Image (cartoon, rainbow, N blue to C red):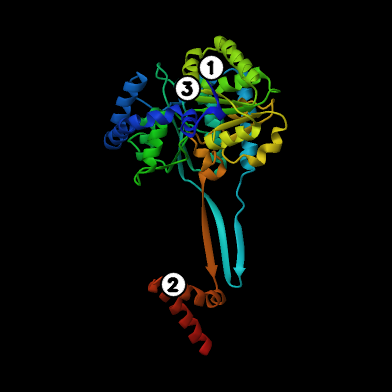
């Protein structure tokens, strides 16, 4: 990891220090992803099969997971894993049930009633990464709030393994949350298939889920196509920013950094610390732990574009964090909870030494699908509202239109929208005639 001193950097160097590796590659991906989307839109299932063969090195005649494959998966997943799934599901359900929207209904003035109600999105596509690391936890994070919201159709796309099957843990997770429509498709072609529909995969209204740079770029592009589907957010390669002081445990910090670095070679981890000796201790712990981990080769590549930055104070660290707007923000310094009101730009915050980012990824109850690439400045992480639309309703009585009508006529008149004005005027005339009688 590159080591920097924030106060010694000029403005341009500071921006470069916080540059994300995925962003630098996005321009080169644009045309490649665009061609995949166009091909799937045109040739549908045939194109999906070709891209699956090309990118996943497997030829599949039937891309839908069968009942038999679900049964096989159930036999492969051990009881202790099932129990862990049950606990995670319970916590995630609790937290997302608490997010249910209460409809609003009130009389803003006599005779004028306004309402706001929530309606679930009808058909949702759930993308579950399954390439370098199958993620059954993502099944929970997507399918559970979709169910609580009331989405009528939940479809999962996830990449096949080299044997043409889906990881048993993903299938078991899906079954436990009631999703049985799963397709063996990954990457940009999966996003295209759900956005446009094929002979096999249904077109959905909205697409959810994290992914690599290809998936993220595909989501951005289909969201700009009115004939496709909207997307939750550009949830791309994982990232974490840790703020620590001299009191923080170097091993805790190192493992928090590694837990995100192991996601993929385009993941990024950043440490901001007020203590030079602490940074050195974290670096030593990183090296020692990396040697013990199965995904060492991925971690090594990820750490090449990650940073350790010495800052003058916690205040300065928070300023840097706000500029970066991390997907995950971990606070490992004294009295961290007292600084929460100063944090605005983060997908999810983890407070104190006993709150590793891992708990949010799996079982604390919060959602782990979060904005990356700095989108935490203007987007929320996945929540129950993501699966709903809010609709307003208004009902006026004769008393109400009489009270508000002249105001609407005036406002429509100054905007030069005479038909708007007329729609009110004819009603007022009708009521005034009745009054004369």
**Mark 1 and mark 3: Cα distance apart in space:** 38 Å
* Label 2 sits on residue: 412
Separation of disc 2 and disc 3 at Cα?
56 Å
Check if mark 2's residue and mark 3's residue have beta carbons within 8 Å.
Answer: no
What distance separates the C-alpha of mark 2 from that of mark 1? 67 Å
Instruction: Tell whether 63 sits left or right of 284.
Output: left
Instruction: Say left or right for 76 vs 55.
Output: right
Asked whether residue 260 is in view, the answer is yes
Q: Nearer the viewer, residue 92 or 3?
A: 3
**Left or right: residue 247 compared with residue 43:** right
> In the picture shown, does residue 269 fall above or below 94?
above
Mark sitting earlier along the chain (1/3): 1
For discs 2 and 1, the disc positioned in front in the rendered view? 2
Q: Where is residue 47 in the image (x, y as percent from the top left)?
A: 29, 30
Secondary structure under tag 1 reads helix
**Of callouts 2 and 1, which one flags the residue occurring earlier in the amino acid sequence?**
1
Residue 370: tell me if it is visible. Answer: no
Label 3 environment density (alpha carbons within 10 Å; few <14, some 14–19, many ≥20): many
Identify the disc placed on residue 76: 1
- Where is residue 13? Give x, y as percent: 47, 30
Q: Residue 142, position in %: x, y? A: 52, 35
Quadrant of the image occupied by residue 359 = top right
Which of these two is toward me, 234 or 16?
A: 16
Corner quadrant of residue 275: top right
Query: Which residue is the site of mark 3?
Result: 305
Determine whether the residue tagged by mark 3 lies in a helix, strand or loop: loop
């Amino acid at each position: 990891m590159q080591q920097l001193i924030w106060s010694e950097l000029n403005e341009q160097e500071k921006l470069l220090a916080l540059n994300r590796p995925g962003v630098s590659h996005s321009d080169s991906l644009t045309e490649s992803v665009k061609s995949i989307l166009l091909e799937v839109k045109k040739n549908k299932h045939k194109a999906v099969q070709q891209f699956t063969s090309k990118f996943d090195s497997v030829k599949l005649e039937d891309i839908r997971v069968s009942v038999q494959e679900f049964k096989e998966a159930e036999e492969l997943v051990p009881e202790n894993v099932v129990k862990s799934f049950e606990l995670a599901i319970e916590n995630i359900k609790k937290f997302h049930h608490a997010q249910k929207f209460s409809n609003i209904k009130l009389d803003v003035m006599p005779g004028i009633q306004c309402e706001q109600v929530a309606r679930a999105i009808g058909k949702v596509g759930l993308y579950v990464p399954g390439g370098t690391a199958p993620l059954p936890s993502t099944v929970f994070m997507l399918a559970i709030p979709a169910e609580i919201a009331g989405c009528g159709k939940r479809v999962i796309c996830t990449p096949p393994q080299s044997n043409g099957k889906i990881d048993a843990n993903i299938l078991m997770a899906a079954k436990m949350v009631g999703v049985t429509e799963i397709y063996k498709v990954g990457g940009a072609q999966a996003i295209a298939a759900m956005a446009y529909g094929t002979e096999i995969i249904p077109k959905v209204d909205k697409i959810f889920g994290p992914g690599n740079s290809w998936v993220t770029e595909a989501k951005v592009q289909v969201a700009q196509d009115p004939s496709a589907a909207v997307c939750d957010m550009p949830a791309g390669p994982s990232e974490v920013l840790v703020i620590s002081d001299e009191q923080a445990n170097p091993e805790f910090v190192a493992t928090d950094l590694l837990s995100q670095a192991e996601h993929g070679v385009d993941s990024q981890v950043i440490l901001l610390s007020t203590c030079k000796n602490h940074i050195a201790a974290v670096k030593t712990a990183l090296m020692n732990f990396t040697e013990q981990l199965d995904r060492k080769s991925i971690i090594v590549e990820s750490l090449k574009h990650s940073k350790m930055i010495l800052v003058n104070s916690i205040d300065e660290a928070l300023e840097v964090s706000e500029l970066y707007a991390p997907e995950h923000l971990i606070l490992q310094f004294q009295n961290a909870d007292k600084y929460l009101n100063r944090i605005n730009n983060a997908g999810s915050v983890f407070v104190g030494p006993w709150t590793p980012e891992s708990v949010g990824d799996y079982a604390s109850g919060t959602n782990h699908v979060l904005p990356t690439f700095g989108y935490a400045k203007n987007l929320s992480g996945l929540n129950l509202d993501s699966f709903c639309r809010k609709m307003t309703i208004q009902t006026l009585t004769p008393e109400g239109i009489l009270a508000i009508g002249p105001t609407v006529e005036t406002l429509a008149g100054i905007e030069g929208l005479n038909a708007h004005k007329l729609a009110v005027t004819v009603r007022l005339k009708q009521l005034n005639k009745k009054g004369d009688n």
